[in-house]
């Protein structure tokens, strides 16, 4: 999506034309991916919630895990595929070969008051933004509370069982941090969405600059949260850290002694 910035920087009509050819499909696909991933995170968090708080539900979840994952992807497609119909690219023939040759507008469907209010503002924002945000906040808080209650409990099982429990705790802790970064990156998005419900006209008229800045910042925060996930996995999982260090030794060809030292440091 940064191709438009490069086109503006180099004042290149060719780059801008290339951007217009793929921007609407890419906007649609990226929003479908973001929505589906947020619901998949919600499903994974609910599973960890059941493991930590309500273990009796795990049998049912294991049977329908594939269907739940498929449903999450379907929700993303159903709620965001309409974005492809909400934009219209207009060509200005008199400005051929210039930076103003093409313009991006909202389509007639997007400007329809009923569609705009009921589908875009109410249904889609509630389902894809507010609903997963508050559910994730609830499940995450319950998981953290349960982990704090159990962290001082004495371990009385066998070694193998304790190792399995340790891996479950590691996976749960990892997911807690992933969800925490997701929640932090979406707080601003939730605030803007609620503000749109309360007074959209005043928001656009009186605070247009702030509104545009915040919407761009939301995209940056979403990208940042996604880029931080790998580092979160590495910080929370000692075994994964060891694999990263082994890979680094192979790539940079560190001496064997240094490799052994790195592996020992992970235990």
Image (tube, rainbow, N blue to C red):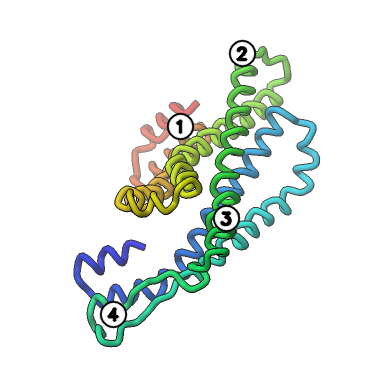
Residues tagged 2 and 4 counted as in contact (Cβ below 8 A):
no
For marks 2 and 4, give the CA distance.
66 Å
At which x and y percent is residue 117?
54, 58
Question: In the structure shown, which secondary structural element does the residue marked by tag 4 occupy?
Answer: loop
For marks 1 and 3, give the CA distance.
48 Å
Whichever of callouts 2 and 1 sits on the residue coming sooner in the sequence is 2
Whichever of callouts 2 and 3 sits on the residue coming sooner in the sequence is 3
Q: Is residue 66 left or right of residue 249?
A: right
To which quarter of the image does residue 191 belong?
A: top left
Whichever of callouts 1 and 4 sits on the residue coming sooner in the sequence is 4
Q: Is 186 situated above or below 143? A: below
Q: Is 153 situated above or below 228? A: above
> In this orientation, does residue 22 appear?
yes
Q: Mark 1 points at which residue?
A: 263
Question: In the structure shown, which secondary structural element does the residue marked by tag 2 occupy?
Answer: loop
Residues tagged 1 and 4 counted as in contact (Cβ below 8 A):
no
> In this orientation, does residue 246 appear?
no
Q: Which residue is drawn at 48% across and 47% down?
A: 193
Q: Name the residue under label 3.
A: 124
To which quarter of the image does residue 2 belong?
A: bottom left
Q: Name the residue under label 2.
A: 152
Residues tagged 2 and 3 counted as in contact (Cβ below 8 A):
no
Q: Nearer the viewer, residue 12 or 177?
A: 12
For marks 2 and 1, give the CA distance.
28 Å
To which quarter of the image does residue 36 belong?
A: bottom right
Whichever of callouts 1 and 3 sits on the residue coming sooner in the sequence is 3
Judged by depth in the image, the label closer to the viewer, 1 or 3, is 3
Q: Which mark is residue 101?
A: 4
Q: Residue at x 67, y 29 (%)?
A: 164
The single residue placed furthest to the bottom in the displayed view is 93
For marks 3 and 4, give the CA distance.
32 Å
């Amino acid at each position: 999506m940064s191709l438009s910035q490069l086109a503006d920087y180099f004042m290149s009509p060719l780059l801008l034309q290339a951007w217009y050819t793929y921007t609407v499909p890419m906007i649609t696909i990226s929003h479908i991916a973001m929505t589906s991933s947020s619901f998949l995170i919600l499903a994974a968090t609910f599973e960890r919630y059941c493991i930590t708080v309500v273990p009796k539900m795990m049998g049912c979840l294991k049977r329908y895990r594939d269907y739940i994952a498929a449903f999450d992807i379907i929700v993303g497609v159903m709620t965001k595929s309409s974005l492809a119909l909400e934009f219209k690219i207009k060509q200005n023939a008199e400005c051929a070969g210039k930076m103003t040759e093409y313009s991006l507008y909202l389509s007639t469907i997007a400007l329809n008051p009923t569609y705009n209010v009921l589908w875009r503002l109410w249904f889609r924002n509630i389902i894809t933004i507010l609903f997963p945000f508050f559910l994730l906040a609830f499940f995450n808080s319950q998981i953290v509370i349960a982990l704090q209650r159990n962290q001082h409990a004495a371990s009385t099982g066998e070694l193998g069982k304790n190792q399995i429990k340790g891996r479950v705790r590691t996976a749960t802790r990892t997911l807690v941090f992933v969800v925490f970064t997701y929640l932090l990156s979406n707080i601003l998005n939730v605030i803007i969405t609620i503000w749109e419900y309360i007074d959209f006209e005043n928001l656009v008229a009186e605070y247009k600059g702030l509104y545009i800045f915040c919407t761009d910042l939301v995209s940056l925060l979403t990208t940042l949260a996604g880029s931080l996930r790998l580092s979160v996995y590495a910080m929370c999982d000692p075994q994964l850290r060891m694999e990263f260090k082994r890979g680094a030794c192979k790539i940079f060809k560190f001496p064997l002694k240094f490799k052994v030292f790195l592996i020992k440091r992970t235990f």
